[in-house]
Image (tube, rainbow, N blue to C red):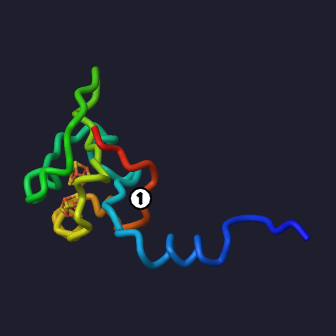
């Protein structure tokens, strides 16, 4: 019989072997028009860059390939907008 979804091996590899990375949510102050770079300032891996936008403060973008999952940015975020989670697309830009 055909099975749906990932194999057990793939599931457990994904759950336990992939490193967590910083994930920036919608509570980022920049989305409310407030300029902030706190996450980038504390990231010793330089894994957060800021994409310029017209009409809004620069948007924080996590380079998942560079992120070590250290969590420093989580506590530094005044908007409590950052969590650690599974990498989504391995942005190496
Ligand atoms: S978890 Fe650590 S390495 Fe990743 S973006 Fe935050 S401060 Fe940088
Ligand atoms: S520290 Fe938080 S509020 Fe500030 S730019 Fe980073 S994600 Fe946005």
Relative horizontal placement of residue 16, taking residue 77 as reference (left or right): right
Give residue 86's position: percent from left, percent from top: 43, 64
Nearer the observer, 1 or 75: 1
**Image quarter for residue 75?**
bottom left
Give residue 30's position: percent from left, percent from top: 27, 42
Callout 1: helix, strand or loop?
A: loop
Q: Residue at x 22, y 70 (%)?
A: 71
Q: Residue reaching furthest top? A: 54
Q: Is residue 73 above or below residue 15?
A: above
Q: Residue at x 22, y 41 (%)?
A: 34
Relative horizontal placement of residue 92, taking residue 78 as reference (left or right): right
Q: Mark 1: few, some, or many residues within 10 Å (few <14, many ≥20)?
A: some
Nearer the observer, 47 or 78: 47
Q: Quadrant of ligand 1?
A: bottom left
Q: Residue at x 41, y 58 (%)?
A: 87
**Image quarter for residue 52?**
top left
Give residue 88's position: percent from left, percent from top: 46, 53
Q: Is residue 38 above or below residue 5?
A: above
Q: Is residue 5 above or below residue 59?
A: below
Disc 1 C-beta below 8 A from ligand 1: no
Q: Is residue 3 above or below residue 12?
A: above
Nearer the observer, 88 or 30: 88
Number of numbered discs present?
1
Q: Residue at x 35, y 44 (%)?
A: 91
**Image quarter for residue 93?**
top left
Give residue 23's position: percent from left, percent from top: 36, 58
Which residue is denoted by mark 1 in the rendering?
A: 87
Q: Quadrant of the N terminus?
A: bottom right
């Amino acid at each position: 019989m055909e099975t749906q979804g990932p194999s057990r091996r793939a599931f457990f590899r994904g759950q336990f072997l992939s490193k967590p990375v910083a994930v920036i949510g919608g509570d980022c102050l920049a989305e409310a028009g407030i300029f902030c770079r706190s996450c980038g300032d504390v990231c010793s891996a330089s894994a957060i860059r800021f994409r310029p936008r017209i009409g809004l403060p620069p948007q924080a973008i996590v380079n998942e390939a560079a992120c070590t999952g250290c969590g420093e940015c989580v506590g530094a975020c005044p908007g409590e907008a950052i969590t650690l989670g599974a990498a989504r697309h391995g942005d190496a830009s």
